[in-house]
Image (tube, rainbow, N blue to C red):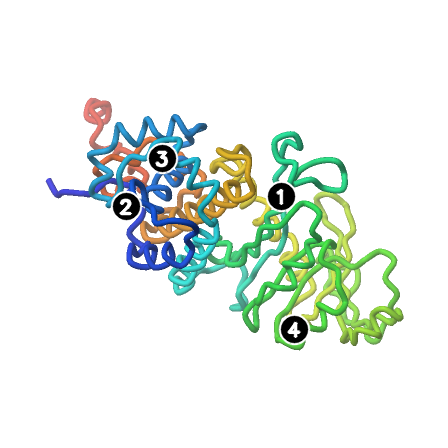
């Protein structure tokens, strides 16, 4: 029987310990750590994300139970007081930098979305993480609530969040959205929360395409009417010029207006894009596929710990969320390497029960084959 390291050890293979220690030295505050390390903190918090532990005491207990297996990971058990102190005091920027480091490695992995065109396809959106105002007064929003906002640019080919930013609940989606540097030739699908005529011009100048919804009260003139395919659901396909004073001042280029009626719901949608070569029906399908980012938010909120927190300070919360994003990347990479068709949420549930099992990760994530009916005794009796 071949020997295997634990599933957690295999999951961490893409992460270079040398790179981690270099980042830990760069993002350090205060005196030198003696009894515990940032690696111990990372292992404890990662274990919390993947195993669903709800408290610092649960993490401490589990780490002590698995101390003989942590040795092979280069870590050791950490007390709940030490873990709490590191979460509150040591800069969370370490794990933000670690996420970006992992992302650089994973970006070389090929992916394929459902469309025929070769352009990379992204969805851009933000999701609120609701908080208690009594526990997190520093996260106060204008509506007398507390919240953080997670901004994500999701690659549809790999289901990996290639662009991530964390902001307070009062921040507009546009601010981090404009800061994301999407690659030339990519297509970005976003909702009406990202309407910005200046940004449309900037994306067009960079060679980045977008698909969004047209504002109902938008002022424009029709420059060209294009042919509409029969029985396609498309109600209009026009080249327009946004000619409001606001749009003209920002140099908004000629854009394409596509009207589409959903045959299932009967709802009518009007889309705006700077892509003139794809069919009008494909433009509507791209916006519909933006639902992938809603699935992503659902996965991380239901399977990772980004709604209940182990600390109340901003640094502790940021630490926990960035480690959750690192956990998602590691699971997504394991899914790619194993070539499994299991959903990421299913893989996380499998790992919850198998983190310290000494089995091949590929074998663990491969669903069992259905039994061969010809080998069943009932079949023999039939003959």
Cα separation between marks 4 and 1: 39 Å
Q: Which residue is mark 4?
A: 277
Cα separation between marks 2 and 1: 36 Å
Q: Earlier in the sequence, mark 4 or mark 1?
A: 1
In front: mark 2 or mark 1? 1
Q: Residue at x 73, y 54 (%)?
A: 193
Discs 4, 2 touching: Cβ within 8 Å: no
Q: Judge by depth and name the residue closer to the eye, 201 or 97.
A: 97
Q: Which residue is mark 2?
A: 362
Q: Judge by depth and name the residue closer to the eye, 197 or 310.
A: 310
Residue 258: x and y in percent read 75, 63
In the depicted structure, whether residue 211 falls above or below residue 49:
below
Cα separation between marks 4 and 3: 43 Å
Cα separation between marks 2 and 3: 12 Å
Q: Quadrant of the C terminus?
A: top left
Q: Residue at x 24, y 45 (%)?
A: 74
Discs 2, 1 touching: Cβ within 8 Å: no
Name the secondary structure under disc 1: strand
Residue 350 is marked as: 3
Residue 148 is marked as: 1
Q: Earlier in the sequence, mark 2 or mark 3?
A: 3
Q: Earlier in the sequence, mark 3 or mark 1?
A: 1
Q: Quadrant of residue 137?
A: top right
Q: Quadrant of residue 104?
A: bottom left
Q: Residue at x 58, y 50 (%)?
A: 166
């Amino acid at each position: 029987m071949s020997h295997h390291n634990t599933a957690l050890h295999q999951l961490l293979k893409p992460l270079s310990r040398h790179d981690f220690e270099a980042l830990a030295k760069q993002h350090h505050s205060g005196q030198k750590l003696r009894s515990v390390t940032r690696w111990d903190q990372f292992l404890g918090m990662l274990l919390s994300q993947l195993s669903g532990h709800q408290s610092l005491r649960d993490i401490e207990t589990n780490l002590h139970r698995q101390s003989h297996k942590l040795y092979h990971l280069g870590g050791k058990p950490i007390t709940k007081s030490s873990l709490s102190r590191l979460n509150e005091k040591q800069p969370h920027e370490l794990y933000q930098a670690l996420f970006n480091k992992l992302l650089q490695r994973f970006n070389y992995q090929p992916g394929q979305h459902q469309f025929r065109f070769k352009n990379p396809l992204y969805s851009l959106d933000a999701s609120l993480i609701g908080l208690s105002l009594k526990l997190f007064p520093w996260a106060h929003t204008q509506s007398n609530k507390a919240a953080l906002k997670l901004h994500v640019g999701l690659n549809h080919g790999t289901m990996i969040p290639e662009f991530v930013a964390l902001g307070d609940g009062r921040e507009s989606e546009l601010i981090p959205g404009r800061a994301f540097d999407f690659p030339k030739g990519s297509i970005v699908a976003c909702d009406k929360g990202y309407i910005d005529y200046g940004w449309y011009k900037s994306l067009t100048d960079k060679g980045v395409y977008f698909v969004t919804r047209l504002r109902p009260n938008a002022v424009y003139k029709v420059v060209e009417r294009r042919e509409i395919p029969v029985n396609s659901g498309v109600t209009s396909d026009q080249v327009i010029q946004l000619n409001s004073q606001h749009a003209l001042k920002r140099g908004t280029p000629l854009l394409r207006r596509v009207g589409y009626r959903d045959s299932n719901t009967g709802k009518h949608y009007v889309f705006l894009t700077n892509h003139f070569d794809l069919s009008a029906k494909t433009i509507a399908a791209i916006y519909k596929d933006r639902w992938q980012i809603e699935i992503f938010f659902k996965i991380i909120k239901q399977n990772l710990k980004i709604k209940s927190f182990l600390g109340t300070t901003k640094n502790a919360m940021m630490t926990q969320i960035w480690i959750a994003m690192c956990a998602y990347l590691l699971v997504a990479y394991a899914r790619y390497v194993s070539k499994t068709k299991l959903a990421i949420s299913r893989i996380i549930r499998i790992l919850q029960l198998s983190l310290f099992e000494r089995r091949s990760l590929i074998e663990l994530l491969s669903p069992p084959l259905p039994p061969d009916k010809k080998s069943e005794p009932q079949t023999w009796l039939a003959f």
